[in-house]
Image (cartoon, grey):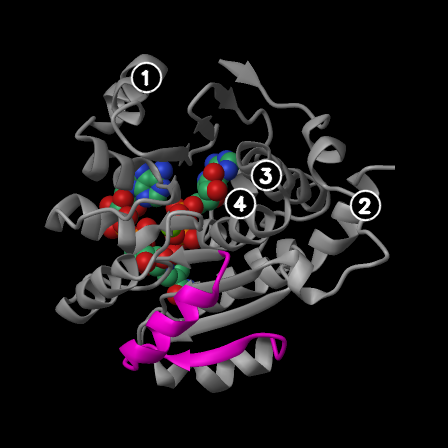
């Protein structure tokens, strides 16, 4: 297993060409956030926007619209019960992030199945939180696309069948090789399994152990893969950036909140981008 270093950042975070516009930096659609878990999809959406995604639309419960726009007016809103609108937004997207705060009700499952039916093979799809749990428990058919799964250890146990205590790199790799996508296995030492390599994130701090931290990472991964050509590198750089910012903040803070990481992303990316 290879240990990630800061070298991944300038290799991935490219200089923005002068002759570019918002469309150059990706259309991201984020789907999730029921009446109880609105914060999850709001944090994911903010993370995608602050990571530099060009155009972001959030498909969530109507009850979250005002809070979403209060936190991130840059995001467009679509009502998660309007399945025709969701389908057309997915068709127009480059990248889809699905699962933060989606929940596991019958309606959540219907949204997931409808979303997957509208995914195209060239799209990048980040699958997080409730979406992973639904796939594991309800045998949902995965779309043919560039898939990136971001489970925590319990979600990985549900998806892979490997008990948390038995989640060794060799056993994880056996299951990843049967899954059609990259796996970001989150823990206090997050591991990333791509088609060709296995990587360990050396960064991270217990100051990060707070609700919404993974939702924020899912949005960052969405923002990075929407902009940067090499998908595996983009995932690695997003994971590294998330923890590196947290470590910086944790030098003076007992706990690091997801929204504080989000606020720091543009400055961190500027500091560590291609020179
Ligand atoms: N503000 C919001 O809107 C928020 C909304 N959220 C949304 O809620 C939805 C459900 O997601 P979820 O992660 O909260 O619940 P679930 O999938 O049942 O996992 C928890 C179980 O797994 C266990 N566990 C073991 N190892 C673990 C590990 N390394 N990391 C984490 N857990 C670990 C853990 O063990 P325990 O804590 O009991 O020791 C517990 O038994 C999802 O859509 C998410 O996006 C949240 O993001 C919060 C903020
Ligand atoms: N002790 C820790 N050390 C380092 N990173 C941690 C620690 N605890 C949690 N994290 C990070 O926080 C995030 C938690 O993700 P997740 O459990 O999905 O959160 P949520 O669903 O509440 O947003 C992951 O990126 C994980 O690596
Ligand atoms: Mg999570």
Left or right of 251 on screen, residue 190: left
The residues bearing labels 4 and 2 have C-alpha atoms spaced at a distance of 29 Å
Label annotation for residue 15: 2
Q: Nearer the N terminus, badge 4 or badge 2?
A: 2
> Is residue 212 found inside the magenta-colored segment of the image?
no
Name the residue beneath numbered marker 1: 168
Q: Which residue is at a point 77% across and 60% down the rendered structure image?
A: 20
Name the residue beneath numbered marker 4: 208
Q: Nearer the N terminus, badge 1 or badge 2?
A: 2
Q: Nearer the viewer, mark 4 or mark 2?
A: 2
Q: Nearer the viewer, mark 1 or mark 2?
A: 2
- Work out whether 24 lies above or below 235: below
Where residue 247 appears, as percent x and y from the top left, is: 66, 39
56 or 242, nearer to the observer:
56
Secondary structure type for disc 1:
loop
Part of the protein shown in magenta: 72-94
Label annotation for residue 234: 3
């Amino acid at each position: 297993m290879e240990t990630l270093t800061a070298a991944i950042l300038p290799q991935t975070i490219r200089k923005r060409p002068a002759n570019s516009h918002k469309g150059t930096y990706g259309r991201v659609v984020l789907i999730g956030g029921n009446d109880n878990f609105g914060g999850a999809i709001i944090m994911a959406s903010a993370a995608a926007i602050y990571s530099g995604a060009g155009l972001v639309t959030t498909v969530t419960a109507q009850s979250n619209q005002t809070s979403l726009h209060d936190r991130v007016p840059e995001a467009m809103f679509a009502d998660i019960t309007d399945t025709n609108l969701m389908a057309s937004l997915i068709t127009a997207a480059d990248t889809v992030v699905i699962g933060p705060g989606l929940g596991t009700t019958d309606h959540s499952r219907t949204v997931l199945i409808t979303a997957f039916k509208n995914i195209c093979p060239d799209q990048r799809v980040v699958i997080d939180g409730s979406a992973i749990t639904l796939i594991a428990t309800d045998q949902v058919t995965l779309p043919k696309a560039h898939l990136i799964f971001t489970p925590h250890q319990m979600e990985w146990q549900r998806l892979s069948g490997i008990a948390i205590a038995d989640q060794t790199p060799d056993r994880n790799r056996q299951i990843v090789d049967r899954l059609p996508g990259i796996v970001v296995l989150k823990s206090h030492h997050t591991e990333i399994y791509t088609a060709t390599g296995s990587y360990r994130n050396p960064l991270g701090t217990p100051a990060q152990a707070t609700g919404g931290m993974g939702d924020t990472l899912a949005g960052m991964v969405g923002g990075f893969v929407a902009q940067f050509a090499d998908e595996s590198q983009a995932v690695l750089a997003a994971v590294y950036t998330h923890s590196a910012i947290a470590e910086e903040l944790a030098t003076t803070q007992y706990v690091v909140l997801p929204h504080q990481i989000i606020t720091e992303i543009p400055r961190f990316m500027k500091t560590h981008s291609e020179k």
